Every structure is written in structure tokens, then in C-alpha cells.
Amino acid sequence: MTELSFPAAELIEQSINCMLYGIYIVTCGIAGRRLLTTDSGRWKRRSEIRWVMVVVSIFLFVNATLDVVVATITLLDAFVFYTANVLSHPLGWQTVTKAFCVAFQSLLGDAVLIYRCWFLWDKSWVVIALSLLIWFANMACAMRLLYLNSQIAEGLVRSVSIQRWFEAFWSMTISINIITTSLIIIRIWMVERQNRKFRAQRQSFISDSDFAHGHQPRTALSLAMRNIIESGLIYTIVSILQLAFLRSNILVIMSALELHSVGITFNLIIIRGAQVTRDLQPQDTVVSLPVQFSSSHTTGTRHSTSPRGQSDGVFVLTQIEKESTGSAAAV
């Protein structure tokens, strides 16, 4: 079977790139609304805005837009201006810039994932030590790749040396995603399991047999866990495909999937998290059982009818994308 040519890969990549960018823009607008406005529609005060997520959203948007612009310029040079034979070989400033965009998007997405893990684990540096170490190694690997892309001569784009650096980069990206996502899921699962024990004691209308057979009602934490798993799975699969097609021109197409999967999954966590928080608030007002994330592990129970009590039931879900503004408590 004849291998896909580089010009054909570039054309397909640009089509997929534009389609995914459109999806990303839609999710970006919805996520921006969740970050900057309340459920009633008013603009949030500065103290209410999760600035870490806002800044990350801006960087992801600018980087994704830069990639689309550079890809468009490449096609214009090839088919309109004829200033250079840019599709005959994968070299030039366009290729270096697009490589930077993919690497930056991946590193930023991993950094946000590590930040969420660090915050959910009560800002424990020990928990994220391995992920953080791999991330710094991956950043050094990305810098080396960009240097090789800028220096490589025509016809050597698939040299063994640069392929090994690509393999190292995507292998570490996959490792970071699997390790950190697992830590987040474990943390949420631990809190949810503890909360179920308290709910079983307080909610007498739910029989012991229901809990024994796993007939518990859906909670914000269980939905948050599913949200994290699905988003992490999307990103991991795309990264694996990136590694699998490393020695093929299909890599160009996979780069578009990789770049936009980071932004889309980032926005989906914010959108779905806010939606679940709003939908489950009325259910969680029946009982609120605070579980401290601090090292003291102090817990308590109380019936909750105030607005504060209503929000406690879904606080962990919000913590996934919230700035560090104080002590954390959940359900």
C-alpha cells in the first residue's frame, strides 16, 4: 500500500484542523460563560472568578488559533501565492511553529492536570512528585525537538535521532496522563466512598440492601469521576495514536487531533462540571456531610438548608477546576 504523501497529509490535516477548531471555539464560548458568569447570568466579581482556569483558557485559545493561522498560511503559499514549494517537504518556519503549538498545548494540558491533582490531594507535593518530574523531563524533551526541527536538513526529517525524541515525548505525555488521572480518580473515589457511609447512616429511607447491592443514587462525585475518566481517555487515545503513527505522514493528521483534544477536553470538564453542579444541588440539600481534605481528616454531619449547605454537596466537583482560595470541603 502506497504511503500517504506529505502534501495529501497536510490537506487532510487542515480540513480536520478547521473542523475541530470550530468545535473547540463552541466549547470555549460555553466554558467561558461558565467561568465568567453566574447561573443567573450576571458577571462574576473578580473574587469569584477562577483565574487559573481563565488564564489557561486564554493560552489554549491563542495557541490553537496560531496553529490554524500557520496552517492556513502554508496552504496559501502552496496554492495561491506560489512563493515556495512548502508542501514538497515538511520543513520551514511553518513546520517549526506548528510543532511548537502541539508541544505547548500538550505540556499546558498536562500542567493543568497535575495542578488539579495537586489541589484535590490537599496541595500535596509528594503525590504529584512523579508526574511533576516527568513533566519537567518532557518539557526538556520538547525543547530538544524544537531545536532539531529548526536545524534539520531537507530529507532528514525522519532521522533516527529526532524519532527517538518524539517517542520519548509522547511516551512521557501518555505516562503523565495515566498516572495523574488515576490519582485524581482515586482521590474522588475515596471521598465518595466515605460520603456513602455517612449518607447510609443519615438517610434512613434508603435500605441497607440497596447500598449493599450498589443501588446508590448518582452523586456529583460519581459524575465528576466519570467526567474525568472520559476526558482523560480521549486525550490518552489520541496521544497513543500520535505515537503509533510516528513514522508515517499520518502523524501530521494526528497532530491536529492532539492539539485540539487538549482544549476540547479542558472545556468539557468545565462545562459538564458546572452542569452537574447545578443539576444536583436540589438533591444534595437533603443532607450535607462535610469531609475535610485537610490532613486532620475531621468530619462532621449536619442537616443543611442554607445556600452554603446546598453548595457543599457538589464542592469537590467544583474543586477540580477551582483556584486555591481556602480550605476544601466536600459533600
Image (cartoon, grey):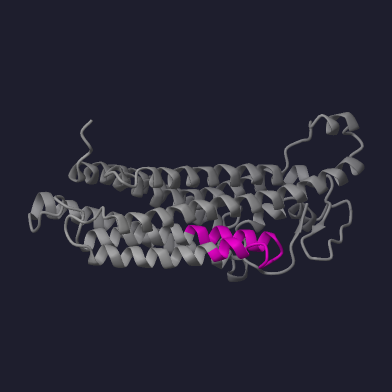
Give the dominant element type of the magenta stretch: helix, strand or loop.
Answer: helix
Report if residue 129 lies within the magenta region: yes
Percent of width and height locating residue 186? 70, 49
Examine the rendered structure and indicate whether residue 125 appears above or below residue 289.
below
Q: Is residue 55 visible?
A: no
Whether residue 120 sits left or right of residue 301 in the image: it is: left
Examine the rendered structure and indicate whether residue 92 appears above or below residue 223.
below
Whether residue 220 sits left or right of residue 266 in the image: it is: right
Whether residue 221 sits left or right of residue 203 in the image: it is: left
Front one among 221 and 251: 251
Examine the rendered structure and indicate whether residue 98 appears above or below residue 143.
above
Residue numbers of the magenta segment:
109-133
Front one among 91 and 28: 91
* Residue that appears at 67% across and 62% down: 127
Front one among 244 and 287: 244
Percent of width and height locating residue 257? 38, 46
Q: Is residue 187 visible?
A: yes
Percent of width and height locating residue 115? 59, 63
Percent of width and height locating residue 245? 35, 43
Front one among 33 and 166: 166
Seen as rendered, the residue at the extreme front is 160
In terms of image quadrants, where is residue 50? bottom right
In terms of image quadrants, where is residue 81? bottom left
Report if residue 309 lies within the magenta region: no
* Residue that appears at 17% across and 52% down: 89
Count the numbered circles shown. 0
Whether residue 257 sits left or right of residue 80 in the image: it is: right
* Residue that appears at 71% across and 55% down: 315
The N terminus lies in quadrant: top left
